[in-house]
Structure formats: C-alpha cells, structure tokens
Amino acid sequence: MAIRDLIPWNRGHNITVHRNERPDPFLTLDREVNRLFDDVFRGLGFAPFATADRLFDHAGWPNIELSETDKEVRVTAELPGLDQEDIDVELAEGVLAIRGAKRTETEDRDRRFSERFYGRFERRIAVDEIDENKATASFKKGVLTVVLPKATARHPVKRISINSN
C-alpha cells in the first residue's frame, strides 16, 4: 500500500490493482467509512471535525428558549440588532414560525471601506393544544417573546374495544 492511497483527496479514484493482486479489504473499509462520515456531515451543513464554534454557528439562528407550564407555552428568541419590522411571527396548524431578515451595512468613506451583510432566517416549532386566538408576542431590546396559552378544552382519551372475529 502506497502512502498516496491514504491521502483524502485521492478518494473517488479507482484503486489500481495489478491482475494478480486483490484490493486490501481494510483499505477499502477505511475509505468507505470515511466517505460515509463525509456524506453525513456534509448533509448537516458543516464539515467534519470542525471546531465547536463553527458547529454552533450552523446549528440554528436565532437562539430559541422554550418553557412550558400548565397554562402556557413561552417561546423566547434572541434577535440582537433587529427591529420589530424585520420579524414575522405566524401560528398555523400547530406550528409556530419565526421568520426575518438581518441587514447590516457599515461604511467608512475616509478609509474607503464598505461592508454589507444580508441574511434570512426561519425557525419552526411544533406546538400542541394551543388557543391560537389568545397568542401574543412582544419585542423588547432584541428579545422576542411569544406567549401561547394552552387550550382549556382537552380531548379525552377514548378507548376502542377490539372485536374478535
């Protein structure tokens, strides 16, 4: 086995095998396991073995905190640097959706410097047994708080008897 066979960027190329040689099963297994991990992490949106800071950057923005009592579900989202007009909150079919766009522009004409950042976000949270007509939301100092009162009428559990044929 040559050292170049262990180099990751050599993956995807066929292993050259002489007519009388069989490929090394351990090398083949190693390549398949590496490919599997690469595919899984690529599907999640970040590279394998990234630092913890990079992992949390892609995990979901904004940060959401959920708390539940017997009477309500409270959702708190940290949205620093946003205005109330940049945020849209919807509750439909048992799903709370928080959407928005973050826009930042910095310009320094003396140094001939200009920087712009635009980004959209959306978080969806499934909620059950909520009284949609009494839901409220407030936004203060970059923190969005959504209060979802629970519905008072609960459906009782109905047992279904099983008939033997």
Image (cartoon, rainbow, N blue to C red):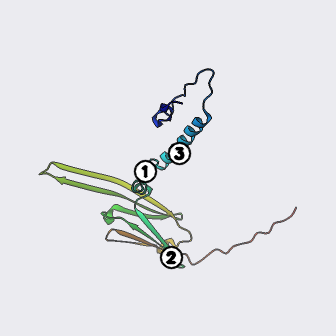
Residue found at x 49% / y 63%: 125
Q: Distance between the residues labelled 2 and 1?
A: 38 Å
**Residue placed at 63% from the left, 21% from the top?**
20
Q: Residue 67 at x, y = what percent?
A: 48, 73
Which residue is most to the top? 19
Does residue 161 lie above or below 13 as drawn? below
Where disc 3 sits, the SS reads helix
| Percent of width and height locating residue 108 | 16, 53
> Which tag, 3 or 1, sits closer to the chain's start?
3
**Which residue of the protein is positioned furthest toward the left in this rendering?**
110
Spatial CA distance of label 3 from label 1 is 13 Å
The residue under label 2 is: 72
* Residue 37 disc label: 3
Horizontal placement of 80 versus 48: left or right?
left
Q: Name the residue under label 1.
A: 50
Say which element carries label 1: loop
Looking at the rendered image, the disc whose residue lies closer to the viewer, 2 or 3, is: 3
Which is more N-terminal, label 3 or label 2?
3
**Classed neighbour count for the residue bearing mark 3: other residues with Cα under 10 Å, few (<14), some (14–19), many (≥20):** few
Q: Which of 85 and 112 is in front in this view?
A: 112
> Of the residues shown, which amino acid type is indicated by label 1?
Ala
